[in-house]
Image: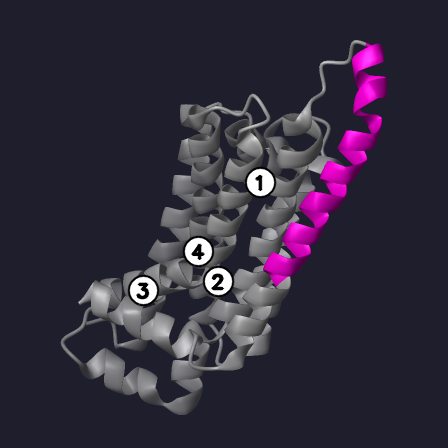
């Protein structure tokens, strides 16, 4: 049932040109930025070599582009998923869904998975472009895998937060605004903190190690905890909308 809901959500998202336009524009921008950074790197490479700098194509091209793709995911996902439950509540279909034999858990996980699948092309494009550059760099398969995992975890977390916030309001624009507020607060926390617990809540310090090929338990726990909490809140919200039965 979860799979059916996910594919129904995916189909509904791509039934309108909005998702296609968003992904196409994001992919074009991402490709342009990557090749622009590559052009700059090729022009300064002789200077870096002469200075004995350890910076290479990974540091100056691939990792900055990965950061850009993560930011694009934070922009696209709330736009795609703001109507996950807001649209159902506004149209009145939520009553039909809650009265069906489908549980709140299945509904939330289905919507969440569908949103992840809808935004997957952007992550795939980034990984494919990194593979093209891999032949001329020291990027290994492990680093590529960890980078893909980092983007997937970011997508999962952003999708979970969007689905939850979509479940608490009938207005899709309000849901998208709330999602942007939470996601960019997590992203910007790192630049406004000097140490201690605020950094632990920031998204970027937990994401960057993945781009450098590091898999650490604390960073995995961060993404899984935020994602799990958001999904739990969404399930509880639907449970309450269904009368708490």
Residue of label 4: 120
* Depth check, front residue: 18 or 240: 18
The image position of residue 195, as x and y in percent, is 67, 25
Q: Is residue 33 above or below residue 234?
A: above
The answer to which image quadrant residue 103 occupies is: bottom left
Cα–Cα span, label 2 and label 4 = 16 Å
Contact, mark 3 vs mark 4 (Cβ under 8 Å): no
Q: Earlier in the sequence, mark 1 or mark 4?
A: 4
> What is the tally of numbered marks visible in this picture?
4
Q: Is residue 155 above or below residue 199?
A: below
Left of 75 or right of it: where is 44? right
Provide the secondary structure element on which disc 3 rests: helix
- In this view, the mark in front (2 or 4): 4
Tag 1–tag 4 contact (CB < 8 Å): no
Query: Which dot marks residue 108?
Result: 3
Which residue was labeled with disc 1? 203
Which secondary structure type mostly characterizes the magenta part of the structure? helix
Specify the segment rendered in magenta. Answer: 26-51
| Residue sticking out furthest to the bottom | 91
The residue that disc 2 covers is: 162
Asked if the residue at tag 4 contacts the one at tag 2, i.e. Cβ–Cβ closer than 8 Å, the answer is: no
């Amino acid at each position: 049932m979860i799979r059916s809901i996910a594919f129904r959500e995916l189909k509904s998202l791509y039934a309108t040109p909005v998702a296609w336009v968003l992904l196409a524009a994001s992919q074009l921008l991402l490709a342009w930025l990557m090749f622009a950074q590559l052009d700059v790197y090729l022009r300064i490479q002789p200077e870096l070599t002469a200075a004995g700098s350890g910076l290479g194509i990974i540091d100056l091209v691939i990792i900055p582009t990965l950061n850009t793709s993560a930011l694009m995911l934070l922009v696209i996902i709330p736009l795609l998923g703001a109507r996950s439950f807001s649209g159902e509540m506004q149209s009145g279909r939520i009553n039909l869904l809650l009265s069906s034999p489908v549980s709140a858990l299945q509904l939330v996980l289905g919507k969440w998975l569908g949103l992840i699948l809808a935004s997957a092309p952007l992550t795939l494009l980034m990984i494919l472009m990194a593979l093209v550059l891999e032949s001329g760099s020291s990027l290994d398969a492990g680093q590529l895998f960890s980078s893909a995992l980092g983007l997937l975890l970011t997508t999962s977390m952003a999708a979970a937060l969007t689905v939850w916030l979509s479940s608490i309001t009938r207005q899709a624009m309000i849901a998208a605004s709330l999602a942007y507020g939470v996601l960019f607060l997590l992203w910007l926390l790192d630049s406004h903190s000097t140490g201690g617990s605020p950094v632990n809540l920031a998204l970027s310090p937990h994401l960057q190690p993945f781009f450098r090929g590091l898999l650490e338990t604390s960073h995995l726990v961060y993404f899984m905890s935020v994602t799990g909490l958001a999904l739990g809140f969404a399930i509880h919200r639907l449970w309450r909308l269904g009368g708490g039965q």
